[in-house]
Image (spheres, rainbow, N blue to C red):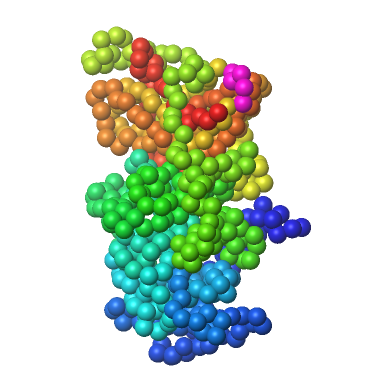
Amino acid sequence: MTANGLHRYPIVFFLLLLLSCGAPTPVPMPASESELQASLPGDKFETTRLRIPSFDGNELAALLFEPREKDFPGDRPGLIFVNSWTLTEDEYHLQARKFAQKGYVVLSYATRGFSTSEGLVTVAGPNDLRDVSAMIDWMEYNTRLDLTRLGMAGVSYGAGISLMALAHEERIKTVVAMSGWGNLEDALYGRETIREVWLNLLLLSGKLLGRLDPEVSQQAKRLRDNVEADVARAWAAQRSPLSYVDKINARKAPVLVANSYQDGLFPPAQMRAFYEKLEGPKQFYLDKGIHASSAIPGLFGFPSNIWNETHRWFDHYLLNVPSSLISQAPISMQTPRGREYYSEFPVLVSKQPMVKLKPMNDLAGFELDEAIEDALEGIAITGSVDSGATSGLPLVSDTADAMINLPVVKQLTKIDRRHAALYMTEKFKSVTRLRGAPQIRLWTAKHKIPQQMVVYLYDCDPWAKGTLITHGVVSERAVTGRFSEVTIDLNIAAYDVPAGHRLVLVIDTRDPLYTNYISERYPVDLIQVGTRLTELALPLVP
């Protein structure tokens, strides 16, 4: 089997990842000392294991990869790698070696509260940002770092901290953020809906393999209980690069962000608003995968396209190596036709006949809403009951879809229409290429208790077999005494709908990925009168 073939089996990498983030590895040396690691034949650098004191005296575990002066004289460009959630300073060992072999001074460190780094995990809080500054200070006085050529990178947690540091630390010239967040509130609590599976996984792993600040659990509880949720939102906003994009734009700092379509933790949609506000050189790299799956092979020495892009990016901006990055369109999307490039995300198309929706449920009459002159009718379903529509088995289904082309499939005739509303388009006469985030607009009648809606978009073949393309969710915690318009952006996708197929939209109220807020059954009435219709807008390309 080739190394490329291994990339298609993420379970192997996932198991290796779990093994690599087990109990923290002790460093058998005093905090004030360092340990020189053995070099391999052909190495043009030296590796040193360190414990670096931060601003408050807490020591952070780190690895330094420093080029030998005889091979690379003078001041050198530098990189700082930041660990992923629960992982150690050794996470980027192989990639750090590759950069050091080209003459970079590389420091890879574990954030406070993880590995043997002291302190508490505060999720990219002020202490984490001051730690970054302390790492830069240490490199300035202890290495041959050229401070005008310093970059920073990380995967997941490390990506978020890298973007936050770019906004707060002017000595960082450029960042590569792989599977990170641009808007932490949207990632964890988008449309007032908790990503239950991922939040539980983060909290559990953080408690087992790190030392969480008690505030982290308190903020999660505020969101779950919907008590002082505004406090939790402010906490998340303080940790969101989107909140500080103006500081990045003031320097026109180059930024490369990379996210995967099936990433349930940090889906690319939450990064899009941050990306689109960037004014300096930028690239948005999108691929088919789950959280961090595109970066993991490169961490273990296997071929990785995103790591290739990372090397090209830093080599250009820190080593002044000419690159096609300058001339290519900045949005790079993996598609069924191969990698495609766009100058901006394709616009939404909603007025063409082929995306008009026909209800598949029987229509029912609703209680008259005084705000609408005509009598109401539409689709009435009962919420808080599973209809059979689903995003799949959490983590497992997305992995199977992303890596072995085993998508979530549902016989659409078996979806229970008592608990789900179904709409379909006309048949597509030719292959239709969807690139981006579909958008749904619907109208709900007044409701006396909160409600939640999960929207699924299926590719429906002539035998009513539905292949899940993408989905989205919204929770309406506030009750309303009148009809309301609801817009839902689905997750970004790149999908080709075959000729002769239809699109089917399914709206229900439960999915295993998300918290189910309301345990008792409740009515959901979707209006279908006049111009108040359920509508689908698609991002299409020729």
Front residue of this view, candidates 192 and 285: 285
Q: Position of residue 537 (x, y in %)?
A: 44, 26
Residue at point 57% right, 74% down? 101
Locate the C terminus and report the quarter of the image it occupies: top right
Q: Main secondary structure of the magenta part?
A: loop
User: Is residue 101 shown above or below 251?
Assistant: below
Residue 6: in sight, yes or no? yes
Front residue of this view, candidates 40 and 57: 40
Residue 120, quarter of the rendered image: bottom left
Residue at point 58% right, 27% down? 432
Quick check: is 294 in the magenta stretch?
A: no
Q: Which segment is the magenta one?
A: 427-431
Residue 63: in sight, yes or no? no
As drawn, is 304 to the left or to the right of 204?
right
As drawn, is 194 to the left or to the right of 66?
left
Residue at point 30% right, 15% down? 367
Residue at point 66% right, 55% down? 7
Q: Position of residue 256 (x, y in %)?
A: 45, 54
User: Is residue 25 shown above or below 216?
Assistant: below
Locate the N terminus and report the quarter of the image it occupies: bottom right
User: Is residue 423 shown above or below 217?
Assistant: above
Residue 529, quarter of the rendered image: top left
